Image (cartoon, helix red, strand yellow):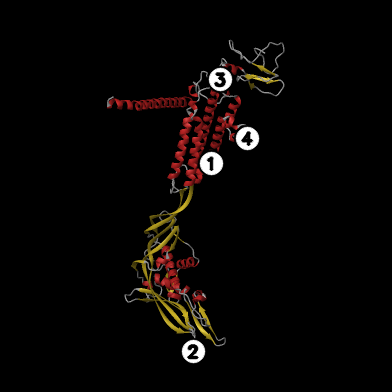
Amino acid sequence: MSPSDSENASGEPARAFWRRAATFLWKHLSSLVIRWWKFLLFVMKRKWRLPVSVLVVTGCIIGSYTFISSLDGKSVLSSRVIHPPAILSILSSIFGICLGFAILDATTISWWRTLLRGTTAAKLDQIWDRGTSLWGLWQTGISPDPGSNPEACVLAAVAFIGYVTKFACGPLLQQALLVQSREKATNETMMMNIPPRIPDGWGGNIDYTKLGNASLSPSFISIIQQWHSNVPIMTHDAKNYTCPGTCRGNATGAGMEANCSSTTESLVFNDLYRNGTLAFTTHFSQFEDLLGVPTLRLVTKYVTSVNETCGATLTVDTCNIQAATIKYPVIIQNSTVSLNQSQLISPEVVTRLKAAGDSPAAKAGTPIGPLTILNGFGNAHFQSNATVTFNTTTQQYDMNPEGVLARLYLDTNWTHYRAVTNCNYQFLSPTDDILSALREVLFRTALAADNGTFSNFSVRQVAIEPVYHVQNKYLISAVITMSVALLVVLWPVFGLWRNPREGGGDLRSVTELEEDINLSPIKGAQVWHPRTPDVDTWMRGMIQYRRIEGASHWRMDDRGMPVPPPNHWVSFEFKEGQSIPGNITFRRTNESVPPAGGDSAGH
């Protein structure tokens, strides 16, 4: 034998094996394809509602996940015709309706498949009852032999899972979408009606007989009252004037510039020969600097420390204030305006201003400028002093305050004191608070002196907006629950084309039925007893029966034919040539028919 013959002999079994394997695979794959094709044709022709329901349920699952995921981080206030909770409610309702249709179709297919296999009426009744009932699973569990009807067990589980899923999917989807708050920062442009300078005379006139050398106008007195009562500063309630949230920016308007310096001095409280030692004082005065610019000077003196021998340190703050157009660091919330005092200590100066009414040489009756306005306001509200004297009678040191500030700024926190002596009188600094009050009063005055001039300025708007936050644990739970329910519902459907009738007959598979299948008892009777001629006509001919006595009802015999209960009169109408069911015996009688059904053709 040549080498080539040996190779052919050894390769022949392998080729035969692969031919048999290919034939086997082709046979089974072609059979599977044919079955699938028959199944699809059957579903599209007879049970088109099932694939439609499955597609809609699948679309609801995908749509719910996509819709909720797309809302993560989106604003709740964004314009929508239908709000997301309503859309989720609609999706869950459609899902529940179509899932119910799919369960009903699965029950119908299982009922007919079991019927064509050959079964009993009791099992068919269980399939119908437990496949359409929420409590079917409970009924299956308490039945004596739950495994005797596997189709009913499967459908009971399917129905229970379907009902639970329809109940749970809505709350899970709603819980997956949570509303939270977050800050949203944007750059905006706003307006404020504030002039670059206060008109001379708006606050009153020069009067050297009055405190602060000013006779204040009713308009400015109203400003002082608003400041004293802490009335909110309001802007116009109009677009670009109000801020929905919190806006921070710099508005240009009439104001002041303050340059301050601080020094210290030493003094002794126990000097018995002095007529009281100055421990606290505030003072306003007006002058012109070397360049001839009117200036308002604020001087505050206050004791900041006292030692064991009553030696004290006196701090002296000196602030030179000049009128100017500045950029106010404002904070606007809705229509309420406030000043950012921390940034107002050193504001950006746009232009320095001079007013004739601010000059120390101004004649009486001259319209006052902004510095004279502040001088009159400051002397009326912040002028104060305190002295410390030694009481020779009590041998104690007493403080004698004049004005409100000396009492307000007395340091009562004893941890700030260095020594425990009877001359311990220390004070806090009033300088920053006085300057803040002057700035606010001048800002209120500028807004009130509105002459139609407005300031455009940029702001940083920070708004608290509600946004959607997706809780993935609930979203994934909802999607898994809905998907499992869909797969469970399809479980009893997939065996549909692989169940030939065991007892033979004309119908080999449910897919070979030429009519629509449903759970109608009339439709079931056609297959239950197919040898009965003209079943439809016979069933339509059975028009009524009336009970004479007894309490029994119609029943089915072993062949599935209807049997009337005993002691009943039954009326039938038959057309000419119609067959009479074989399990019903008729006899002629001379007895009269009970007067309920009228005359009949036979008794």
Of the numbered discs 2 and 3, the one sitting upstream in the chain is 2
Write down the residue under mark 1.
Answer: 168
Write down the residue under mark 2.
Answer: 273
Amino acid of disc 4: Ile
Question: Is residue 453 shown left or right of residue 401?
Answer: left
State how far apart marks 2 and 3 are (Cα).
131 Å
**Where does residue 104 sit, x and y in percent of width and height?**
53, 30
Question: Is residue 134 shown left or right of residue 337?
Answer: right
Q: Quadrant of residue 213?
A: bottom left
Say which residue appears at 66% left-offset and 19% top-offset. 564
For this rendering, which residue is in front, 255 or 421? 421
Quarter placement of the N terminus: top left
Write down the residue under mark 3.
Answer: 526
Write down the residue under mark 4.
Answer: 142
Camera sees residue 368:
no
Q: Secondary structure at mark 2?
A: loop
**Where does residue 308 sit, x and y in percent of width and height?**
49, 83
Q: Secondary structure at mark 1?
A: helix
